[in-house]
Image (cartoon, grey):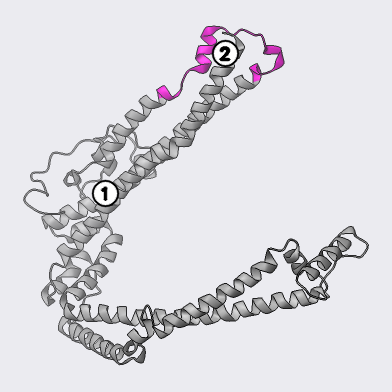
Amino acid sequence: MHVSQFLSLARQRRTELQQALAALPTELMGRHGARGKALEQLREQTLDALAEVNLPTLDQATLDAVERFTGYGRFRGLNLAAHLAAEQERLTQRIAAITADERFIRREELLDPTAGVLTLRAKQARDELTLIESGLQRYEREPGFLDLYRRGYRTPSYRQSALTLQYYKDWKRGDEITEKFGCKAFSEVRAAYENLLRGKAVCQQTLNSIEKNIRQVRELITELNTAQQRLSHLPQAVLGDFRRMLREHLALADRKQLFQWAGGDRVRESLIKRLDGVEKQMTYTKSMAERRFEEERRYLSEQLTRLDRKITKYSRPKYANAWIPPNEAQVWLRDPRERLAAQRARFWRQYDRVATYDRYDRYDFAVDMLWWDVMTDGRLDGNFIPEVYEYRQAHPGYTYVRPPEPQYSYYQGMDVS
């Protein structure tokens, strides 16, 4: 193969590899990101369901049982009736305070889109600010003005030596600007500009104050609507508060301990297993995707480097009429993406096996086992994942043995969605 033909094909291959390298984040991490979002949503749904199972209704007996099943002690000793009465009183007082607030009483007068007092004041302030900014731009767009102004031309802070050429350039430009703005001295130009700056600051401060007042009136309206809505559905609102509090605890609680607290309740146990399993899936798939990304990035980079060296070498004048043995050229021009495609297809099969796993009931908190082995049936090497590596280092000679199928499925005849 003539060197010119080889170089043409090599440059084309180089472009293809560069494009493949640039597309890696989208192709690999983009797909992983979509799966990660789905797992995150499943985790959030599971936490919601677990909180609801442990706090299905708002009554004293249910509230008192929360700690026994979850270890959450914030409700211990809480008198529900007294809590509801206190919250009702708080809301009632706040509603009364808002409806008596002069700003709320005058809300339509203040905020009317066409004739509201604050609306008109804000418009006037914005118009004035726009006018001042227009005046400032006249100065700031003048070539050389801002440079002279910032360096303190014709002020004590001006440090340019009269022995430099720059001094005379400044002098000339300063005189031109002074004449253009119809002034007798550059100091007058400076004073006019600074006067506009002060006007802008005052106008901006006025506008900020008006907009703050507008926000406060709107916040009062929103707060009143929220308070009235909460008061009209107080038990449901308090139940939602308590579930969110419990949910925060469940998100951080030790999963094995939660399982023990569940006391054999199948619905609770199934949700705890699903929560723990989904979180492991999130960790595992992230490690898998990052590892695959780095492997492909490194491989493509190495292939590009080798090809670059060949292109650089055979671009030298002494090789202008060289011939390259076809078998060698074929090896150098081989498309490495074919190998990557096969590897990536195998990777996605393994990845999807972990990412889509849903037999969370197969895990047993009472047995020393890895979620990784449960999800992969012990067939995939996971030593690149810190948790898996550390476990196997701590258990020399460990071999995964698939546990017998559960006598029942946690998901049969129950809704844990």
Q: Secondary structure at mark 2?
A: helix
Q: Residues within 10 Å of mark 1 (few under 14, many from 20)?
A: many
Which quadrant holds residue 174? bottom right
Viewer-proximal residue, 239 or 284? 239
**Which mark is on residue 46?**
none
The magenta stretch spans residue 188 = no
| Residue kind at label 1, given as amino acid type | Val
Viewer-proximal residue, 240 or 278? 240
Above or below — where is 104 with respect to 131? below
Which quadrant holds residue 27? top left
Above or below — where is 37 with respect to 68? above
Mark 1 or mark 2, which is nearer to you? 2
Q: Are marks 1 and 2 in contact (CB under 8 Å)?
A: no
**Which mark is on residue 5?**
2
**Residue 394 seen:** no
Q: Give the residue at mark 1.
A: 278
On the image, the x and y values in percent for residue 39 come to 28, 49
